[in-house]
């Protein structure tokens, strides 16, 4: 079949190849491909080899999705299950009778035995041993000695190798040191042995002389615990501090270093760091380094072009390992969930075509980019070989690469054809290696996998070797239908995507907004006035607001409203009620949508205000603006739903029920989500026809003023929305007790929330009162995450740290207790402690800051008193000293305490700061009891891989929002309606379908339509 012009070959890249060249190449691809395929099929694994079993298991799993998920999950946690009782329990939980009935006969027996009481321990252990043996197939040993031995075996087969130390998430600097240390030992010791290995020309000879015998691959994310594309320069600096010595060692000891590629979010950063080091004087003339390009990425060809231009400038070639990419499912799901463009091709043939275009490009630039083709797809490899031949490339300058334990029959064929083959050999412990294994299992059981098509499904050679194109799907299924992506949400509402800070333009926009604002503050503080009925009100007193990251920077002078201002604001709002109500639902919903539009336009400027005003790190500030947009859109959507009157008619009687506004709403908002929560409560009240007096938190009055301006610009009449900055103690009681205040929407501390409840009740009961005030109060939390003894600790540690220390722990949803099962307690505390110590504390304006300042001096003093209490009553296991920052802003470093008394202040009181308490639980039930052992019920989480424990947690943890195997902050409007019960709050969930009803009363009109036995026909719907 002719390749699609411009897709299979060019892909938009310039190429010297003419159409005739392409035709010749394609004919050669078929010849080479057939020959490779025939030889590989002849060496196909048989039923006696472990590879055959692996293929069969993967194959059979592809037919039953539920089974596949269960078995992959069981496999994933196997290495953790080293205690017989836990192992036995997991096997039973994952493989119940229903699952057993669906298993193939060969496996059914083993799992049946594992469920029978007599044989259970033996069978479960046998199953674990078999799984671990399969996992080890993909791993070249658990330590450098075993890996070196395995590498030598490859050399005996005339193949090269590249060693890769297993491990994914590096959660602390000590782990990053350990990773670098392991490579240091490898690069010190292995070259010494390698010098004595007999030469092998096929493996050792390169285009310009001998190639290094030792070749290692490494992941940059493992060299820095805070590896994050939001802060490219800070990340690069830290990574390079560990990478430089490794490159130096490799260069001195004649080894080669290859940089692996991970997720798309870190791709540009990885390429930038690679370029930076390779350009440094001491490495600029070093050819034995390389980087991976993943061709499933739509951007891959553009990246290659820019790498070629850069390599020309460098003057020394680099190696490019072309792969298709190992994280396709993750990239697709992650982007879809985030509402970002999916970075990977969505049709397999496009990935293949892109791979061929990339191969051609790299080979045409082989003097700059040395081609290494990492693939098990014989069509892709044959194509590479044919292009290399056609271009007359020196074979010593090209290599094929394959994975250890995968596609072994193909390896013989490639070497026999006279090409250098390098085997990618991961080594290390199984627990950190399971993510790698699961990726291999996914690959082997994918419908689109070449290996599966060729060696399991025995798809005909003509199909396997066809040039990539829409018709050439290996399964014969048209790709378009196989890869269609389901929509994220229903048509009515979609969450506003967060800004992707791995994109340079986004980082620039944020940086510029921060600089603009800093310049504005330098010119003098911004005045935040009281605004009633659209008029600024003179206030006798104003108080300064300073930057929490830097006391010296004065941001704003905030007018302090008085009790008389509060009174007038309520009176004006009451007068504005009838016309706002008459305006109707649709008009009000449209105003919210307009406001969303303006918020969207000013997104970076608003986020920048939060960075200065409350010390929110970049990402958190952006998320707050996005949530404010969500509230506008979601409540507009909900309002249209509620606008429809409900009719229940019977013959002779018509009933109409509709929603009416309650009256004047007083919105008292906190500073910790200074835009989102204020917006949510305000627009909910507005869209339902109420008028509003908006009382922002003292600490975040500037961003609140901007919201007031935006809502007026969007069409809210000035009399409908008053802006009343000032001190809560001064205006709060007047607003709450005012006879015309119908609703108090409050978010904040439990103490203030309860005081509002009491004041509202007293005022409602007072003589002459004409309404019972409605109080909607979202209060605090003392939220716990349970870490079970089979939990994936990598994920749990990352999520606990993020949940506990994101925005310095100043979220009502923040994790402040972590309850760890005894068996993993010490390991978990060790890792948590190392991760906490690695957090970077700094000013919020710095994109690399993970922990910024506390909101004010009062907050700092309060948190410090809890830390002092922790030092007195518990064991401090991590404490980050903020050093000189303490003199600059209201900084308190993250703290971790173990052996905490669950009944003491650290176990019971909301701290609202970067302090985390750890508790030990003897069993899962006790863990739940501990989690439920406070008066609050807001958020909670559990990390476990036991289906039974997850079920138990979901059923019995007392919290408004329970999160399973993820962090417990960051609730999204509509997807995670947010709010708690018990002492955590008295309202229904924000961002949920019942929220607006709280701002409304329901009124039913019943009409008897029967007059003297005559009734009109029934109303049609
Ligand atoms: C030596 C070596 C080193 C490697 N290093 C890395 C690395 O650093 N980073 C990395 O990510 N991977 C790496 N890999 C893994 C590699 O990405 C996978 O093994 C490879 O993608 C499998 O591709 P294939 O050509 O062998 O198989 P094929 O079966 O031809 O292709 C599988 C590829 O197609 C993609 N695909 C499947 N379905 C679709 C679809 N519907 N639409 C679009 N694309 C689809 C898959 O994601 C996968 O990338 C490496 C592989 C080797 C051999």
Image (cartoon, rainbow, N blue to C red):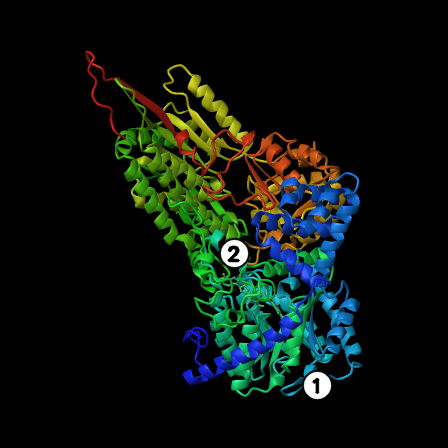
Q: Are marks 1 and 2 in contact (CB under 8 Å)?
A: no
Q: Quadrant of the C terminus?
A: top left
Between the C-alphas of marks 1 and 2, the distance is 56 Å
Of 756 and 803, the residue lying toward us: 803
CB at mark 2 closer than 8 A to ligand 1? no
Q: Residue furthest top?
A: 1012
Q: Quadrant of the N terminus?
A: bottom left
Label 1 crowding class (10 Å Cα cut-off): few <14, some 14-19, many 20+? few
Label 2 crowding class (10 Å Cα cut-off): few <14, some 14-19, many 20+? many
Q: Which residue is labeled 2 in the image?
A: 845
Which mark lies nearer to you, 1 or 2?
1
Residue 365 is left or right of residue 104, and the answer is left
Q: Quadrant of residue 188?
A: bottom right
Q: Earlier in the sequence, mark 1 or mark 2?
A: 1
Q: Position of residue 3 (x, y in %)?
A: 44, 75
Q: Is residue 373 visible?
A: yes
Q: Which residue is labeled 1 in the image?
A: 201
Of 372 and 827, the residue lying toward us: 372
Ligand 1 located in image quadrant = bottom right
- Which label sits on residue 897? none
Residue 223 is left or right of residue 608, and the answer is right
Please tell me whether residue 163 is drawn above or below residue 282 in the rendered image.
Answer: above
Q: Position of residue 330 (x, y in %)?
A: 55, 56
Of 94 and 365, the residue lying toward us: 94
Q: Position of residue 153 (x, y in %)?
A: 76, 73
Element at badge 2? Answer: loop
Q: Residue at x 53, y 69 (%)?
A: 464
Element at badge 1? Answer: helix
Q: Position of residue 873 (x, y in %)?
A: 74, 37
Report how many numbered discs are placed on residues in the image: 2
């Amino acid at each position: 079949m002719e390749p699609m012009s411009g897709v299979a070959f060019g892909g938009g890249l310039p190429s010297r190849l003419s159409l005739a060249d392409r035709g010749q190449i394609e004919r050669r691809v078929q010849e080479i491909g057939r020959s490779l395929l025939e030889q590989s099929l002849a060496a196909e694994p048989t039923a006696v080899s472990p590879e055959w079993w692996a293929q069969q298991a993967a194959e059979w799993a592809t037919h039953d999705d539920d089974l596949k998920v269960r078995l992959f999950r069981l496999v994933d946690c196997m290495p953790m299950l080293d205690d017989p009782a836990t192992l036995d329990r997991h096997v039973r939980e994952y493989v119940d009778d229903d699952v057993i009935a669906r298993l193939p006969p060969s496996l059914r027996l083993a799992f049946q035995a594992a469920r029978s009481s007599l044989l259970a321990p033996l069978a479960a252990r046998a199953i674990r041993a078999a799984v671990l043996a399969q996992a080890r197939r993909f791993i070249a040993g658990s330590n450098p000695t075993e890996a070196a031995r395995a590498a030598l075996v490859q050399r005996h087969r005339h193949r090269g190798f590249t060693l890769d130390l297993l491990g994914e998430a590096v959660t602390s600097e000590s782990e990053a040191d350990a990773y670098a240390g392991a490579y240091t030992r490898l690069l010190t010791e292995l070259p010494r042995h390698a010098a004595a290995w007999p030469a092998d020309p096929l493996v050792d000879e390169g285009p310009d002389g001998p190639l290094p015998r030792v070749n290692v691959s490494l992941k940059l994310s493992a060299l820095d615990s805070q590896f994050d594309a939001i802060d490219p320069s800070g990340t690069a600096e830290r990574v390079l501090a560990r990478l430089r010595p490794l490159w130096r060692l490799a260069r001195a000891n004649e080894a080669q270093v290859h940089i692996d590629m991970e997720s798309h979010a870190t791709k540009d950063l990885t390429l930038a760091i690679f370029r930076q080091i390779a350009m440094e004087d001491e490495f600029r003339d070093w050819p034995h380094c390389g980087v991976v390009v993943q061709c499933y990425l739509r951007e891959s060809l553009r990246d290659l072009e820019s790498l070629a231009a850069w390599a020309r400038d460098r003057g020394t070639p680099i190696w490019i390992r072309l792969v298709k990419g190992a994280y396709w499912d993750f990239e697709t799901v992650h982007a879809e969930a985030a509402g970002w463009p999916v970075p990977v091709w969505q049709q397999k043939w496009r990935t293949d075509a892109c791979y061929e275009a990339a191969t051609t490009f790299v080979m045409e630039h082989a003097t700059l980019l040395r081609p290494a083709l990492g693939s098990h797809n014989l069509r892709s490899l044959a194509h590479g070989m044919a292009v290399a031949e056609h271009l007359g490339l020196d074979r010593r300058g090209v290599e094929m690469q394959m994975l250890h334990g995968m596609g072994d029959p193909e390896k013989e064929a490639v070497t026999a054809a006279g090409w250098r083959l390098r085997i990618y050999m991961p080594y290390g412990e199984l627990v950190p290696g399971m993510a790698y294994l699961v990726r291999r299992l996914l690959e082997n059981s994918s419908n689109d996998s070449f290996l599966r098509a060729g060696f399991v499904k025995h798809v005909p050679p003509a199909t396997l070797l066809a040039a990539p194109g829409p018709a050439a799907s290996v399964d014969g299924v048209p790709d378009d239908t196989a890869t269609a992506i389901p929509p994220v949400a229903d048509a009515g509402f979609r969450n506003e995507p967060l800004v992707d800070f791995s994109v340079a333009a986004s980082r620039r926009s944020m940086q510029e907004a921060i600089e603009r604002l800093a310049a504005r503050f330098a010119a003098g503080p911004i005045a935040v006035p009281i605004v009633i009925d659209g008029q600024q009100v003179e206030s006798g007193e104003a108080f300064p607001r300073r930057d929490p990251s830097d006391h010296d920077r004065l941001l704003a002078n905030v007018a302090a409203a008085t009790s008389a201002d509060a009174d007038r604001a309520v009176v004006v709002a009451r007068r504005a009620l009838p016309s706002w109500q008459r305006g109707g639902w649709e008009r009000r919903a449209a105003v919210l949508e307009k406001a969303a539009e303006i918020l969207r336009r000013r997104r970076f400027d608003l986020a920048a205000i939060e960075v200065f005003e409350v010390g929110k790190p970049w990402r958190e500030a952006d998320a707050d603006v996005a949530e404010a947009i969500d509230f506008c859109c979601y409540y507009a959507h909900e309002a249209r739903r509620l606008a429809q009157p409900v009719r229940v008619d019977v013959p002779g009687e018509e009933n109409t029920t509709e929603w009416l506004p309650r009256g004047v709403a007083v919105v008292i908002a906190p500073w910790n989500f200074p835009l989102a929560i204020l917006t949510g409560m305000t627009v909910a009240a507005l869209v339902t026809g109420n008028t509003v007096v908006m009382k922002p938190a003292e600490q975040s009055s500037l961003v609140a003023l901007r919201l007031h301006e935006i809502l007026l610009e969007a069409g809210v009449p000035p009399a409908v929305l008053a802006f009343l900055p000032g001190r809560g103690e001064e205006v709060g009681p007047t607003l709450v007790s005012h006879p015309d205040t119908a609703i108090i929407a409050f978010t904040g501390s439990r103490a203030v929330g309860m005081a509002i409840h009491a004041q509202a009740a007293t005022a409602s009961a007072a003589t002459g009162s004409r309404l019972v005030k409605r109080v909607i109060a979202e209060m605090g939390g003392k939220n716990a995450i349970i870490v079970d003894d089979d939990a994936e600790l990598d994920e749990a540690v990352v999520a606990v740290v993020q949940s506990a220390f994101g925005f310095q722990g100043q979220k009502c949803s923040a994790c402040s207790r972590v309850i760890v099962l005894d068996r993993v307690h010490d390991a978990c505390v060790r890792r948590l402690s190392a991760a906490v110590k690695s957090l970077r504390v700094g000013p919020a304006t710095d994109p690399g800051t993970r922990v910024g300042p506390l909101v004010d001096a009062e907050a700092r003093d309060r948190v410090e008193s809890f830390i002092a209490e922790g030092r007195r009553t518990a064991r401090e296991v991590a404490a980050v000293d903020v050093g000189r920052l303490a003199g600059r802003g209201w900084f308190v470093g993250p703290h971790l305490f173990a052996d905490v008394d669950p009944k003491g202040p650290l176990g019971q009181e909301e701290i609202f700061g970067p302090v985390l308490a750890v508790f030990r639980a003897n069993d899962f039930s006790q863990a739940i009891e501990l989690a439920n052992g406070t008066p609050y019920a807001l958020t909670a989480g559990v990390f476990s891989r036991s289906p039974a424990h997850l079920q138990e947690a979901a059923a019995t943890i007392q919290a408004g929002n329970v999160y399973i195997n993820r962090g417990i902050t960051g609730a999204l409007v509509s997807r995670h309606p947010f709010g708690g019960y018990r002492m955590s709050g008295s309202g229904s969930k924000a961002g949920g379908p019942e929220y607006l009803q709280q701002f409304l009363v329901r009124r039913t009109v019943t009409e008897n339509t029967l007059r003297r036995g005559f009734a009109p026909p029934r109303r049609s719907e």
